[in-house]
Amino acid sequence: MRVSLVSTGDEILLGEVLDTNASYAASLLADHGFSIGRHYTVGDNLDELISVFKSALSEADAVICCGGLGPTRDDITAEAAAATSAVDLVVNQDVLEDLKNKFSMLGLKWTDNQERQARIPEGAQVLSNPLGTAPGIIVQMQPAWLFCLPGPPREYKPMLAGPVLAKLIEIRNSRSDSKNTGVRMLRLFGKGEGLVENALGDMAASIPGLSVGFRAAFPEIQIKLRAQGATSQDVETILDQAELAAREKLGDLIFASGDTSLPAALLDLLQAKNMTLAVAESCTGGLVGKLLTDVPGSSATFLLSMVTYINEMKAKLLGVTAETLEHDGAVSAACSKEMAEGVRRLSGADISLAITGIAGPDGGTDDKPVGTVHFAISDKTGTETKLRSFGFRNREYVRRLSAYTALALVRRRLLEPPAGAE
Amino acid sequence: MRVSLVSTGDEILLGEVLDTNASYAASLLADHGFSIGRHYTVGDNLDELISVFKSALSEADAVICCGGLGPTRDDITAEAAAATSAVDLVVNQDVLEDLKNKFSMLGLKWTDNQERQARIPEGAQVLSNPLGTAPGIIVQMQPAWLFCLPGPPREYKPMLAGPVLAKLIEIRNSRSDSKNTGVRMLRLFGKGEGLVENALGDMAASIPGLSVGFRAAFPEIQIKLRAQGATSQDVETILDQAELAAREKLGDLIFASGDTSLPAALLDLLQAKNMTLAVAESCTGGLVGKLLTDVPGSSATFLLSMVTYINEMKAKLLGVTAETLEHDGAVSAACSKEMAEGVRRLSGADISLAITGIAGPDGGTDDKPVGTVHFAISDKTGTETKLRSFGFRNREYVRRLSAYTALALVRRRLLEPPAGAE
């Protein structure tokens, strides 16, 4: 069953707002086994929108339109839907009453233009919008269906993932091409997309019903396993088999499946081992702390990050020696070692991490080009250092890769502790 | 002159990759006075692409297609362009030679499928691609023009902003609707989009040739001034007049025009005053340090961020007193004050900043709901504290708003120093 997407709104058309709804919808629907036809983006213009609706409804089984349901005069989606299906636009009394209730509950003043949001194509079905005012609209135009949803992502996404997806599945089930589908995402850091793809090779060919997709979500790689089967149990079996095969090939590089980020996976591991972490950051400037504290509840294991951005602070607060700074420089294995040991001493953490490098664009030398980054991991068994040369694309690239590498190094140390560490 | 955009590729269609090229192109072209028709997204399917090319060429003066020019069999854009204009696809010998040279210079092995990238619709113009292999293609189909560009953003964007934009302007200049246009962006933090819009009121109406757009680029607001005039000097005069009027209404809330971020504007101001900054972060977890060090060269003024994520570290390292932690708690004006004074003492910075609050989703109480954040700014004249209640949407919302508020408070202190501060 083929679904096409229409995004309306001058702010999307003119590139002022990035259209995240369309990629969200496409990805969600593809995960549920729908084939995606086309996306169209069109401005706040009635004739244009009607013309796009007609094109889309002629090439797809269902069309999902996003935006243009608000109270202002440039909100023209309901009118375009009515014109496309050659019916009148009528004020729906239930919707009107619901709108007035919402306004009074929120203490907002009712103005007459709000009534626009209650105008629905005659005979259309109304989809309630618990997180906003404008309801969604479903218009059946045999053989195709048109779904109109409000544009704000916090209203659009739950309406799509909830009632609209359910309705699409119901429509599909009433047709002959019905199948059970499922999806699972594995997340990996430390190997490029091409190498991951090679490592998994012909996995999809050897497991019937499986298809495999790859996505570089810098700096991680996401492996998307999609399964089709006769029953939902078959689908789960296929996904389990595929996950097992992928983990056999890629081992601990896969840090999680589903929504868990690398920082969250590391914090889970620390918590399971009842260990605390402290960090000393130079070139990442606070990014490692920021990534760890993106995870709610991180204060159970993450104690401290010392962002010692200048040499004087490394010396004064972390105890990096004058000799190291003079002889090896701040970007050196010796400095990273003293930083990691310093922050572990200050914080009393069980394990600590230090990062010092050159994020660019300036500051590189022949010996230490931009992208040179030293890491140290310190625990009661001692301190281990690593050097990585990331090259230079831009500052954000070097810094993000450094932060992820650092977290992955701590994770590796926890998964394969040296003798005597536990 | 109306331009429409086509994006090709299953990865875009299926929502696996966010299409940033389309919004980049729309924004750039709108800034240069082109009107944007529609965007279309279509998968790697020849018939679909031909059908979309025909639709787009019938409604626009120029169509810019992105993607599908690579060496693999799903790269079908050149073939679709040839079919749309009913000409043959021919191997262009200059392009072929250029491709072979690039491969040999990069030490890559030449394979026969690479020759696909040299196949060009007969009579089409070739656009060289200095950052990649596949060249761009320009096909003139009176009265409309079709531009095909490679999909990788680092190849697409410079080709669009360089030769394609120049060609579009040349085409427009050869027509009657030629005008000089210009754009300037003002950046503001500390007032919502609606209030900014109200404050500027009818500015566009009172300055002929000016149009004004607003964009919420959370947490900042961007004001886009667009001008049209007979000469480029007229355009500059209109933009200067508009910027002056906006600054009169909004004052120092406008922190920069153009590419300068709020952290960069603050670092510039610190440097101009020859002052250094240190930070103590709790709920932002390193984000303030990260934002400051996004700016190259920040080490001239930014000394240190202490990410003291747990109470024990606030006490041990920053000297927050046991009495404050027991009596007022870590989320309090008293704690923020001691944190700011502590980090200033430790670092020797001229001015310091502290943030402590509840980012959620958990940890809120009736007295201190999620979104409660205390700030302190300390310099030699003393320490000032502020309380903000941001409410709760999500953790990232509270944290990002906290970090920007903190930077804006330091900026305000520097712009309006208390008596005796300088």
Image: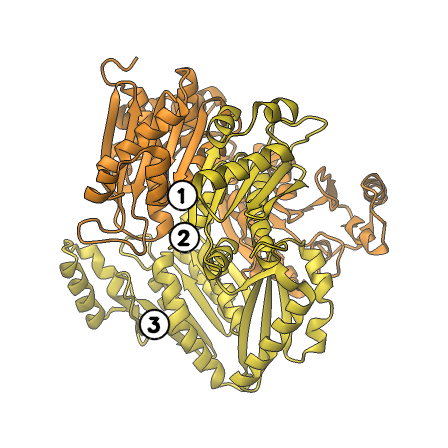
Chain colours: A orange, B yellow
Whether callout 3 and callout 1 share a subunit is answered no
Give coordinates of residue B279: x percent, y percent.
Answer: 49, 42
Q: Secondary structure at mark 2?
A: helix
At label 2, counting other C-alpha atoms closer than 10 Å, the crowd grade (few under 14, some 14-19, many 20 or more) is some
Residue located beneath label 1 in the image: A285
Contact check, label 1 and label 2, Cβ < 8 Å:
yes
Q: Secondary structure at mark 1?
A: loop
Q: Determine the residue positioned at 65% across, 62% down.
A: A44
Quarter-wise, where is residue B161 in the image? bottom left
The disc at residue B87 is 3
Quarter in which the C terminus of chain B is drawn = bottom right
Residues under labels 3 and 2: Cα distance?
56 Å
Amino acid under disc 1: Gly
Give coordinates of residue B117: x percent, y percent.
Answer: 26, 62
In-front residue for pair B171/B336: B336
At label 1, counting other C-alpha atoms closer than 10 Å, the crowd grade (few under 14, some 14-19, many 20 or more) is many
Q: Chain of mark 1?
A: A
Residues under labels 3 and 1: Cα distance?
56 Å
Give coordinates of residue B275: x percent, y percent.
Answer: 47, 54
| A195 relative position to A396: left or right | left
Whether callout 1 and callout 2 share a subunit is answered no
The answer to whether residue B227 is seen in the rendering is yes
Quarter-wise, where is residue A225 in the image? top left
In-front residue for pair A249/B322: B322
* Mark 3 or 2: the one toward you: 2
Q: Secondary structure at mark 3?
A: loop
Amino acid under disc 2: Ser
* Mark 3 or 1: the one toward you: 1
The disc at residue B298 is 2
Quarter-wise, where is residue B150 in the image? bottom left
